[in-house]
Each structure stands twice: as C-alpha cells, then as structure tokens.
Image: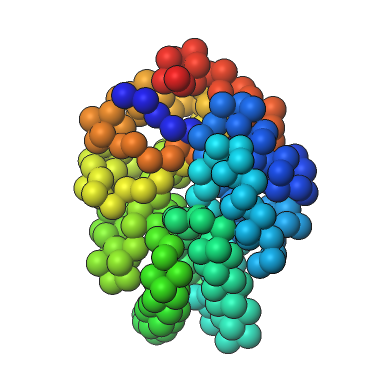
C-alpha cells in the first residue's frame, strides 16, 4: 500500500506560498497542509490569495488540506473573543473553499480550567452554538471539518461527529501523551469511516514535543501497519517545528520503507 505524505506551512520557511508548494513537491510530498493560525501562518493567507494558492498547488502537483486556528477557540466565556474567533474561523473556511482545500482540521475547545458544573454547562452550550455555526458554514462552502484528538476519549470524539457531522483527524503524537486509555488501533479504528487526515510527529510520551519521526518513543512500524489494516489512503501530514525536522522525518520514513 502506498502512503501519501505532506508537510505544513510555517513562517520559519518562507512567506511566499509558491515556496511552500514547490518545496513540498521537491521533497516528494503529495500534500501541503495550510495552517491558518496567526502565529504560524505566512502573510499570504488572505482571501484574495486563495485563487493563487489553488493555481500554484496545481502547478506543483500538490493537494491541499488545512488546519484551523488552534491557540484560541470560539468557545469562550468572553463574548468579544467568541465574536472575533468566529469571524476568523469562517474566513478560514471561505479561503479554503476558494483555494480547493477540502478538509480543515479543528481542535476541540480547551476548556476554562474552572471545575464547576455551571461552567461546564455554559461551555457545552457555547460549543453547541459555535460548532453548529461552523459546521453549517463549512457545508455551504464544500469543506469538511475534521475534529482532532488532543487528550479526548473516543466518546468525546464520537460526540463531535454525531452532534456536528464532523470528520476525524487522528494525531498519533497527541494520542501518545493522552493517557492511552485504549490502544490507538482501537481508537482510530472506531472512526475509520470518518478518518480523513492523519498527523504524525514524535515525542517521549509526556509532552507534545513535535519531534522528528524516529526521535521519540512511538513505534512507527506498528503504526503504519495499523494504517494499512484500516486501508487508509488519505493525507499523512508531518508536524515538525522546522524544515530540518521535516527532512529528518522523511529520512526515517524512507529507512523504515513506508515512503514510496
């Protein structure tokens, strides 16, 4: 089975979309994941540049996926934060629809840090309101929203799919620091019909380090064997901190003979 790998856009490489698309092609990637977070997004992520992104990626032979902003959520106690973040999320969806990005990964809300039934009830109501709006807007734009596992259980992930019609992005690095309530084969297998994206990066089981593949404790041969069993044929996005990490990851994937 042939896997299709990709890299993310980050400001440490360039501010020009052309550079990202052609760098991905030069390294042998089939995908570029566009990050819409302000901290990690090059300056080209403006509505007027969506058509250019689509043209350049097609010229480079690169398919596109995307990642919603992740440092803040629209599920927030502060109504001003909620309003601003909703606009940013909807702009990312609109850009994606115009650029040919079919899937956007979305982080679950991070919560408030306050242990209170009243707080949890309020957050669930806000989550229902905001994510329903995001889901409807994405459907009209022809974009799939894929919820990503952080420290969530399978029940949490399933709730997002059932409640909002979301798809699934499986992050093996996040699973490795989540407490491992169940094996990742069972975890990912429960949602194989909704699995549309996979994120890969390494760590030592305690912190979200985003190390190059092979530099942590994740068993990568077993992981890719699992993807084969699931017959997963979508994008596999490397999430490293810099280009050196990406190059190192590619070398390791070639070493274990999953890069073709």
- Kindly identify the residue that appears in the image at 59 percent across and 83 percent down: 83
Whole-percent x, y for residue 245 in the image? 64, 29
Q: Please indicate whether residue 237 sits to the left or right of residue 151 in the image.
A: right
> How has the structure been colored for display?
rainbow
Camera-nearest residue between 99 and 128: 99
Q: How far across and how far down the image is residue 51, in percent?
A: 63, 59
- Residue 133 vertical placement versus 102 (above, below): below
- The quadrant of the rendering that contains the C terminus is top left
Tell me if I can see residue 201 in this picture. no
| x 31%, y 37%: residue | 232
Q: How many marks?
A: 0
For the question of whether residue 220 can be seen, the reply is: yes
- Name which residue lies at 43% across and 28% down: 218
**Rendered image quadrant of residue 80:** bottom right
Residue 257 on image: x %, y %: 43, 15
- Residue at position x 61%, y 41% in the image: 59
Q: Quadrant of residue 152?
A: bottom left
Quadrant in which the N terminus appears: top left
* Residue 151 in the image: above or below residue 94: above
44 horizontally vs 149: left or right: right
Image location of residue 22, percent across then percent down: 67, 36
Q: Is residue 31 left or right of residue 131?
A: right
Quadrant of the rendered structure where residue 39 is?
bottom right
Judging depth in this view, the residue of 112 and 31 nearest the camera is 31
């Amino acid at each position: 089975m042939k896997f299709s790998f990709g890299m993310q856009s980050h400001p440490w490489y360039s501010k020009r979309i052309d550079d990202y698309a052609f760098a991905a092609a030069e390294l042998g990637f089939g995908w570029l994941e566009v990050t819409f977070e302000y901290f990690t997004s090059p300056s080209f992520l403006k509505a007027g540049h969506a058509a250019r992104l689509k043209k350049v990626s097609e010229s480079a032979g690169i398919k596109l996926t995307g990642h919603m902003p992740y440092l803040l959520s629209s599920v927030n106690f502060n109504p001003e934060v909620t309003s601003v973040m909703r606009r940013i999320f909807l702009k990312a969806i609109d850009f994606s629809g115009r650029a040919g990005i079919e899937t956007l990964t979305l982080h679950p809300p991070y919560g408030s840090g306050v242990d209170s039934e009243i707080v949890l009830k309020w957050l669930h109501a806000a989550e229902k309101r905001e994510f329903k709006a995001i889901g409807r807007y994405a459907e009209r734009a022809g974009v799939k929203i894929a919820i990503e596992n952080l420290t969530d259980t399978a029940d949490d992930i399933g709730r997002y799919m059932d409640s909002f019609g979301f798809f699934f992005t499986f992050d093996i690095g996040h699973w490795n620091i989540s407490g491992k309530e169940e094996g990742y084969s069972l975890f990912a297998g429960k949602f194989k019909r909704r699995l549309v994206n996979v994120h890969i990066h390494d760590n030592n089981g305690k912190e979200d380090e985003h190390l190059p593949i092979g530099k942590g404790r994740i068993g990568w041969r077993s992981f890719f064997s699992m993807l084969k069993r699931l017959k997963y044929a979508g994008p596999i996005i490397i999430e490293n901190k810099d280009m050196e990490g990406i190059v190192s990851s590619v070398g390791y994937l070639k070493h274990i003979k999953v890069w073709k």
